[in-house]
Amino acid sequence: MGLAFLVYSLKAYIIVISIIMLIYSIRHFIFSMNRSIGEQKLFYQDIIDTDLPSVTVIIPMHNEELVAANSLEAILNSDYPSDKLEIIPIEDHSEDGTRKILERFELIHKNIHPFYRSSGNRGKPSAMNEVLQFAQGDVIIVFDADYIPPRGIIRNIAISFLDPEVGAVMGRVIPINVSSNLITRLLDLERTGGYQIDQQARYNLKLIPQYGGTVGGFRKDVAIALGGFNPNIITEDTELTFKLYARGWKVVYANRAECYEEAPETWAVRSRQVTRWARGHCQVFFRYLFPMLKSKYLSFLEKFDGILLLFIYFIPLILLIGIGASLTLFFLGEMNLFSSIFVFIMVATYSSFGNAAPFYQIGVGALLDGSHARIRLLAMLMFNFVYYMWYISKGAFHAIFDVIFTRNPEWQKTQRFRKQDQ
Amino acid sequence: MAKNSKIQKTRSIILFTIFFCSVACGLLAEASDTLSSSITSLDYLKTKESVTEEITEQNVVKKVLHNLDEKKDFNFLLIFIIIIFVIMLFLPFFPAIRELYQKKDDKPLFVSMDYTKDPRFFDNSFREKLVANVDQVGIDRCFRITISGKEELIEVVEAKNIDNFNFGKYALYLDGDLHMKKGMNFSKEVYVNGTTELQENTKIRALLSEKDLILGKDCKVIRWIGSEENIFVGSGCNLGVRCTCEKELHIEENCVFKSLYGHPIITDYSVQNEEELKEIDLDIENSEEETTEDNLEKPVYETITFRKLKDDKSTISDNSLVMSRNELSLPKNTEFSKDIIVKANLIIGSGSQVKGTIKCYNDVTLKENVEIDADIISDKNIILGSNCRVWGNLFCQGEITIAPGCEIGTEGIVKSVIGKKGITLEGNVKIHGYVLTEGKGITA
């Protein structure tokens, strides 16, 4: 009796996750088709307007002596009117030479106003909350310290706020250290799929593009009115996205606002990064799923896409459990769900469309970028898939335990790899 | 650190192996199950061979299999399937391994670090390259520069000698004022260090004029034209990809464009026909004595608060009002002082004043004499009635139509009119700044 119940439960579980994977695969397919042959929505970067909003550029820094000077010089080279541009690098409990670098820049440039933190909670959300109280710009634009913003990017991001519905803007992140090793090449492919296809399609289809916390901006007054950033949520960017949407604001995606970043170069660093993202994202799921569903400002499609977006970091965990269920059923000799042909179709469909659905996005994205040879690396993403299954599941587990045991995670910084003066 | 990475790698390999094996086991189990059911049904058929001999297909299969040793060939078949499966499973990895070793595409995507949004960027950089070189070279000489990634030879010639010149071979630097005959064809880039006057039916690839640029009727621009002063465009011209100048850009009717830039851009013609003009003259003659300032009616504005708007509404901030569901129509002579976000069509009655940005998910229609003291953004089309005044930008995913007498922006401040699918400018329209469309721009 107990065994029969177990068998039926496992079979039902496999059917359910197959349906979920099918929904995601259809979603990825729709996004790929939209970018391939669908109508593309014009973005605001072509607007030329003398009346630009005032901007504060924030660059959180913790032990960033390797990269601080490069990012500040790139921002100073911006074509944004200097009388409307304020730059606030946040030196957050650094133990290296970051502070000295900032003091040097402060002496030379009048619109650089570093903020030094040596007390209070360490971490980006806490630092941003403090800076929001005295930043002068109407628009806050954030760059991570290892980013190298091009000349026109601040204008491209700031001009979006002419739209009164826009609460935040996200630009496109491009790895600069692609050629370092296999992992950087694979991460470059992931970024291509994520930004060139996923984000842009969500913008085209009026769904939910996501604010990513860097190479992006938000309205200062709105962020303050919504309570700032929660220091107990690691992914403050995802939190801001859903907070904005729940209250009627929109996030838009600026594909033309491209910026170089440094991708992790070791699997160890990447594993910590992806675990952190999964944990933070799942935290946001628990806090914002119902506010988003109850929001009177969102359409049905926006809510549906929001659910899929919030749930995405649980997928590896449910897949891992699904593999366990499949193996259990196999050794119990109970793999027949309906009949053999249906099982074969389900497995084949799942393995081709379910696994490969992100591959559609990455392949189409690479084609749109004019990068054809790197598409050959698509098969290697199988390693990422298996690798992420473990670490994202770990992050999801942490998030579940955070809720159950009301734990507050510690904020962690991603390790840098760039050599000084590079 | 090294030990940790070894553990990570080992863990990854184990996980991958488990995943691969579980998928392979599942597929093989299904393949073997399917095959053994097929063999079972064939056995059944063999014992029933005496029942009927009319079904020829079954007879063929039976005969073939009858000659086989079923058990032995089943094993061969299984091994064959496994080999095919393994080959197909690993096939996608071969191009990947090749790319890892050959590294044909391992550079980061190109991002132009110096890119800046400047509608006259190309004109200015073209001019800088030419001016920098021509001083060193002199008249009736040549020099090379790079234009659009290609190296071009530039010939320096006096403009007054151009009639005898052999066009088409080289790009030109023309010193002095240029006055061309009708129907000339410039197939390379041209820079004129003076005033440029092109007659009817001239065809130009690209031209930059240091002083005023005058285009006759029916001229065709393949790429772009620009001037450091004013541009005057005759009727029926095709202005190519870009037409920009530092001062006034005057365009007559029936011209086609993609991008314009001027301070301001003026469509220099009236849409009234002659009969209407005669009627109006008569009216003015008859009523001249009666018209005084006291008799002119001034509009009485009615301030609309959101309480008076009949629809589902809410605020997302102190400045923004969100309207949803149904079409919103503001009555005549309305005064409204908020940003307004409408999720349906929006119609603003004549004579109204709106002091806030308009964002609309559908069409925005302004009746005549409306004033908007901010931007208009639409996911579909924007239609401006006659004599409207908009101090901000117009931006839409559809088409923009601007009726006669409208003015966009203000002197000294650049604003933009951007309609993804098309822009129609009627007569006597003034735009301070930039016009852009991916579709067709016309002066109607």
Image: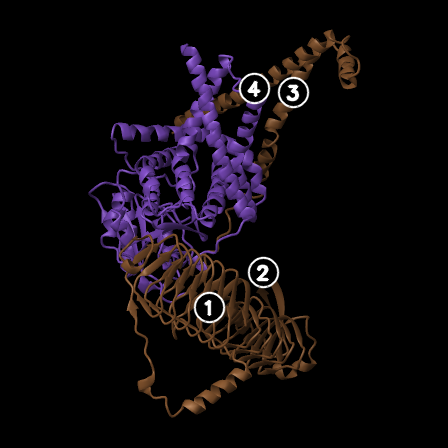
**Coloring applied to the structure:** by chain
Reading the image, the residue beneath label 4 is: A339
Q: Are marks 2 and 3 in contact (CB under 8 Å)?
A: no
What colour is chain B? brown
Reading the image, the residue beneath label 1 is: B434
- Depth check: B90 or B285 in front? B285
Report which quarter residue B301 is drawn in: bottom left
The C terminus of chain B lies in which quarter of the figure?
A: bottom right
Give the alpha-carbon distance from disc 2 to disc 3, as whole Å.
54 Å
Pointer 2 chain: B
Pointer 4 chain: A
Q: Are marks 1 and 3 in contact (CB under 8 Å)?
A: no
- Depth check: B392 or B125 in front? B392
The residue under label 2 is which amino acid type?
A: Gly
Tell if the residue under mark 1 belongs to the same chain as the one under mark 2.
yes
Tell if the residue under mark 3 belongs to the same chain as the one under mark 4.
no
Q: Which residue is drawn at 23% across and 46% down?
A: A117
Along the polypeptide, which appears first: circle 2 or circle 3?
Answer: 3
Give the alpha-carbon distance from disc 3 to disc 4, as whole Å.
21 Å
* Label 1: how many Cα within 10 Å (few below 14, some 14–19, many 20+): many
The residue under label 4 is which amino acid type?
A: Ser
